[in-house]
Amino acid sequence: MRILFLVHRVPYPPTKGEKIRAFHELKFLAARHSIDLFCFADSPEEAAEARPLEEFCGHCYIEPLSRFRRASGAACSLFRGEPLSDGYFFSSKMQHEVQRAFETDHYDLILVYCSSMAQYVPRPAPAPVVIDFVDTDSAKWSQYAHISSFPFSWIYAREARSLARYEKQLVRESAACVVSTRQEAAELQVDGGLPIEVICNGVCPPPEDGADMDEGIRRLQPYVLFVGTMDYLPNVDAVSYFAEDIFPLVRKSHPELHFVIAGRNPSRQVRRLGLHPNVVVTGAIPDVYSYVLGATAVVAPFRICQGVQNKILEALAAGQPVVSTSRPARAIGARHGETLLIADTAEEFASAVLSLLDDPSVRVKLQGTREFVKARFDWQKNLGQLDRLLDRLVNLPRLEVGVAGRAETR
């Protein structure tokens, strides 16, 4: 099968949730099919760093798209009444390159990763179109609106409404749509539309020989840990919530405990959290796994959340206790007290963390989660479901499958 794969962010290195899923899809499908990849990078340096992707692709087009061009594109979409996300990821050069690929090559299938890339698919599409929404972006923007003040609350609410209409349109027109959780499928399903396929993420097993713990990590112990890209709003909100509302409650009983915030690009708001007693902001770290292993617990105090949080899966795969708010726990089918601890209010969350500190039996019970992860979140097993879906669509008579995308020229 010959597949054209459109991705909004270059899926290498696979160090962020959206990149991790796209990378594993590319790697899995490339072992079975011929893939042409078209994607954006944040900078020429990021594009150069992603050259290893060429080994998986027949053709690999990576276009750097600066923040200024993204912002100006989003502003233009605001005046046109379109989703800002489409303008943010629009490039006439990308449009030209994709159009030329359609003119010079025959594709059996078009795989669109994230709704913002559907704008590059002509109408009518020359092949069945499958969209991996991953999660429901419109719902995430709605959550942004609820925690923000004017004028951002208005902008975010507008984007939520605009994207929701566009997502529903794509669901009706595509040959198939894919998401990462049942929650996302329920949010995107439309009356009369085809059932939305749920294809879960996977998680790579931790190294069998473990990881060396350097002296810097030992000096931080005991600590609870949050790992993520620290200029991403849901992550920023989560660590701010924990540091300001939850952690002081925990330290009343355990003043020796540290809260470690580990991850690249900490925003100014995150860096300021490092001024709080026993809060440590590391910035980028060379080995996430060693920090996970050294933690008393991994915390996931998300108030804004869509889809699967890979950081939770990775902690569970390492056998580490996790305390999470309810939405990301539901996304992976976790049960309170069996897979992890679930808490939503600051008081409940603090109590859950304290139970791990004060009761060794709770820690022991939650350390047996590796089998849970292995059974549900195996990349080969889950992406096999995607491969079967694509094969089924390609083998249908052409008139039985839908087409997606828009062909307007800007």
Image (cartoon, rainbow, N blue to C red):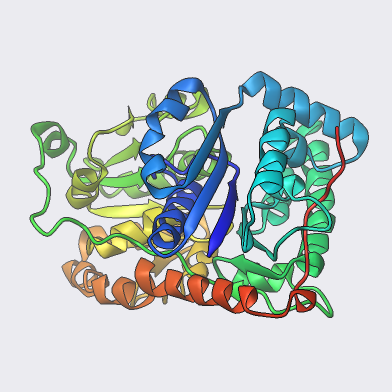
Most foreground residue, 28 or 127: 127
Residue 182 in sight: no
Location of residue 334 (image quadrant): bottom left
Q: Residue furthest front?
A: 104
Residue 136 in sight: yes
Q: Residue at 46%, 41% (x, y): give it.
A: 239
Residue 381: percent from the left, percent from the top? 38, 75
Would residue 79 be found to the left or right of residue 141 on screen?
right
Residue 268: percent from the left, percent from the top? 50, 22
Q: Residue furthest top?
A: 68
Q: Residue furthest right?
A: 80
Image mark count: 0
Is residue 273 shown above or below 218?
above
Most foreground residue, 10 or 228: 10
Would residue 110 be found to the left or right of residue 272 on screen?
right
The quadrant the C terminus occupies is: top right
Is residue 11 shown above or below 63?
below
Location of residue 205 (image quadrant): bottom left
Is residue 228 shown above or below 71?
below
Q: Residue at 71%, 68% (x, y): give it.
A: 187
Most foreground residue, 130 or 128: 128
Residue 153: percent from the left, percent from the top? 78, 39
Q: Residue at 69%, 50% (x, y): give it.
A: 143
Would residue 389 be found to the left or right of residue 275 on screen?
right
Would residue 221 be found to the left or right of residue 239 on screen?
left
Residue 407: percent from the left, percent from the top? 84, 46
